């Protein structure tokens, strides 16, 4: 009996356990919200959801959020105890590039379970809102000023405010025919409208880099003014003549003066929403009396500009003309290249440089170019052509010691530009000697070196002949030949001891003979002494001196 009662009690407790647990959890008869959506438009963060059938009456809703670096959930400001099915949490400071998680629950006497929303990144989730539009009317035109989506201190588009592009749809208020205009700036002028007519338009923004396209904003309508006495100039265009820009336009009346202004489109991007645009006067196009003006290319730096023209008769002034877009890259003339030629062995090396203005400043052309080079022999008109992308070009296989002439022009590689320059001035250069000439030069030098000894020998022989003919040797006179007989020459070659000396004396008495013999003996001794000291012709000198001395002594004895 007791066991049966305990078993029944246990069964009841087990049966009631789910209800007790559900009540303890506060989830009885209260379900979580359904279809929770997050809308991010510019810097506005909005949550929307649907109630469940049970969550009627005094039911409120609350949200929590969690960042990637957080472990705990935090109450979402602006979205606590909400009685409606919508809340705005734009006041929350978030990193728009970080992921965020959200969850919601219903609250009454009890609370429902949490319903988590799929995590999202604010910038990826964000949509572009409608831009702010301001209109100004003229007689035949409407000027539109557009401010970027969001506010000036917008966080969502802080890095993209200058990257927005705009498109609009315009129509007459009395007609349903719409005209679409794409890719306009934050300031745009729609011309060729009817005076005193109401026009309506709407504008949307887009970020092409992020592939985001906004929605059209509200419709704006404005009525054009009464037609002005002086119409604005029409058919504005820019052409290139002689490397200068020529701005032309058409006008109905004569004896008018005109002025031209320009505005850099980059200014419209840097300061979007600023309606105080600073138009500038083109110096060479102020108060001109013709329907054109000329200005040099260096008036504008690289970029895109807006140009407009205004007419005046001294008393009345027209509205500004339709603004035309002027792109320096597209409409600028392509100047011929400047190049230098260096002569090499059997070839020419061409270095191509940037063209220069009259002020000797280089022209900066950022778009890629290819070069067409024509060259020919100076004595011929047969031209040969090469096309190169490089600025260093070598023309090989040319004739040595030949004058070649070269000219070149540039072509834009971009098919959209489709521009070509005129040909440059002709430059002529003579090639240097080739390898064949060098070989002949070496052979010639070698031949000269081999022939040099023979030439020297021939010169020597020729000099001998000239000396023999024009400068003969002098022969001695006949008496000298008799004196230098063969025997006397032999005596000169003999030594002193072998010389024979003939002595001729006149003997008058015996005493004289003795003296002469004694003198003769002394003379021989003296000769022997002289032959020992000298081997040369000095012997003869000594002998003469001795003979002279002996003669003098003999004369004294005779006296």
Image (cartoon, grey):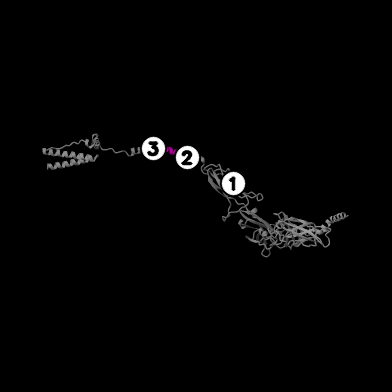
Decide which of tag 1 and tag 2 comes sooner along the chain: 1
Give how far across and how far down residue 462 sits, in percent.
37, 38
- Determine the image quadrant of residue 102: bottom right
Q: Of circles 1 and 2, which is in front? A: 2
Quadrant occupied by the C terminus:
top left
Question: Where does residue 56 sit, x and y in percent of width and height?
Answer: 83, 60
Which residues, given as a range, are shown in magenta?
438-458
For residue 457, the mark is 3
Question: Of callouts 3 and 2, which one flags the residue occurring earlier in the amino acid sequence?
Answer: 2
Q: Residue at x 13, y 43 (%)?
A: 556
* Magenta region, main secondary structure: helix
Residue labelled with disc 2: 442
* Left or right: where 542 falls relative to 396: left
Q: Residue at x 14, y 39 (%)?
A: 518
Q: Residue furthest front?
A: 2
- Which mark is on residue 373? 1
Q: Which label was assigned to residue 291?
A: none
Vertically, is 36 above or below 478? below
* 452 is within the stretch colored magenta: yes
Mark 1 and mark 2: span between their CA atoms? 36 Å
């Amino acid at each position: 009996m007791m066991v049966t009662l305990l078993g029944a009690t246990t069964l009841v407790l087990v049966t009631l356990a789910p209800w007790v647990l559900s009540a303890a959890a506060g989830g009885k008869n209260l379900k979580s919200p359904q279809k929770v959506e997050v809308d991010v438009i510019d810097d506005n963060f909005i949550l929307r959801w649907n109630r469940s059938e049970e969550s009627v009456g005094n039911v409120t809703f609350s949200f929590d959020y969690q960042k990637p670096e957080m472990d705990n959930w935090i109450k979402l400001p602006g979205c606590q105890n909400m009685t409606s099915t919508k809340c705005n949490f734009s006041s929350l400071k978030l990193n728009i590039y970080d992921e965020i998680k959200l969850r919601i629950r219903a609250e009454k006497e009890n609370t429902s379970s949490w319903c988590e929303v799929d995590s999202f990144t604010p910038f990826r989730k964000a949509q572009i809102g409608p831009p702010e539009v301001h209109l100004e009317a003229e007689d035949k035109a409407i000027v539109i000023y557009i401010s970027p989506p969001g506010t000036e201190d917008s966080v969502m588009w802080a890095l993209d405010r200058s990257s927005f592009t705009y498109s609009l749809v315009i129509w007459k208020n009395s007609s349903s025919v719409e005209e679409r205009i794409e890719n306009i700036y934050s300031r745009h002028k729609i011309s060729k409208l009817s005076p005193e007519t109401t026009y309506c338009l709407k504008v949307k923004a887009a970020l092409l880099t992020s592939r985001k396209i906004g929605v059209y904003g509200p419709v704006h309508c404005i009525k054009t003014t009464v037609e002005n006495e002086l119409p604005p100039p029409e058919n504005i265009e820019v052409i290139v003549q002689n490397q200068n820009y020529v701005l032309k336009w058409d006008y109905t009346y004569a004896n008018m003066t005109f002025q031209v202004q320009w505005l850099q489109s980059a200014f419209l991007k840097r300061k979007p929403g600023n309606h105080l645009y600073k138009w500038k006067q083109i110096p060479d196009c102020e108060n001109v009396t013709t329907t054109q003006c000329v200005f040099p290319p260096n008036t504008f730096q690289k970029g895109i500009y807006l140009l407009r023209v205004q007419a005046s008769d001294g008393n009345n002034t027209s509205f500004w003309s339709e603004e035309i877009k002027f792109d320096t890259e597209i409409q600028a003339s392509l100047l011929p290249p400047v190049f230098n030629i260096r002569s090499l062995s059997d070839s020419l090396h061409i270095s191509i440089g940037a063209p220069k203005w009259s002020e000797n400043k280089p022209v900066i052309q950022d778009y890629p170019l290819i070069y067409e080079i024509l060259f020919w022999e100076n004595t011929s008109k047969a031209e040969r052509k090469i096309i190169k992308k490089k600025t260093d070009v070598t023309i090989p296989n040319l004739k040595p010691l030949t004058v070649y002439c070269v000219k070149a022009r540039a072509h834009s590689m971009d098919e959209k530009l489709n521009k070509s320059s005129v040909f440059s001035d002709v430059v002529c250069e003579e090639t240097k000697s080739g390898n064949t000439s060098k070989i002949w030069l070496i052979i010639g030098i070698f031949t000269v070196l081999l022939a040099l000894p023979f030439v020297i020998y021939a010169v020597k022989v020729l000099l001998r002949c000239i000396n023999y003919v024009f400068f003969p040797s002098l022969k001695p006179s006949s008496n000298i030949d008799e004196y230098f007989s063969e025997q006397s020459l032999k005596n000169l070659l003999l030594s002193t001891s072998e010389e024979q000396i003939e002595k001729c004396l006149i003997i008058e008495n015996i005493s004289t003979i003795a003296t002469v013999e004694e003198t003769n003996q002394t003379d021989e001794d003296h000769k022997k002494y002289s032959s020992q000291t000298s081997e040369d012709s000095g012997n003869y000198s000594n002998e003469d001196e001795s003979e002279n001395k002996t003669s003098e002594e003999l004369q004294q004895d005779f006296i």
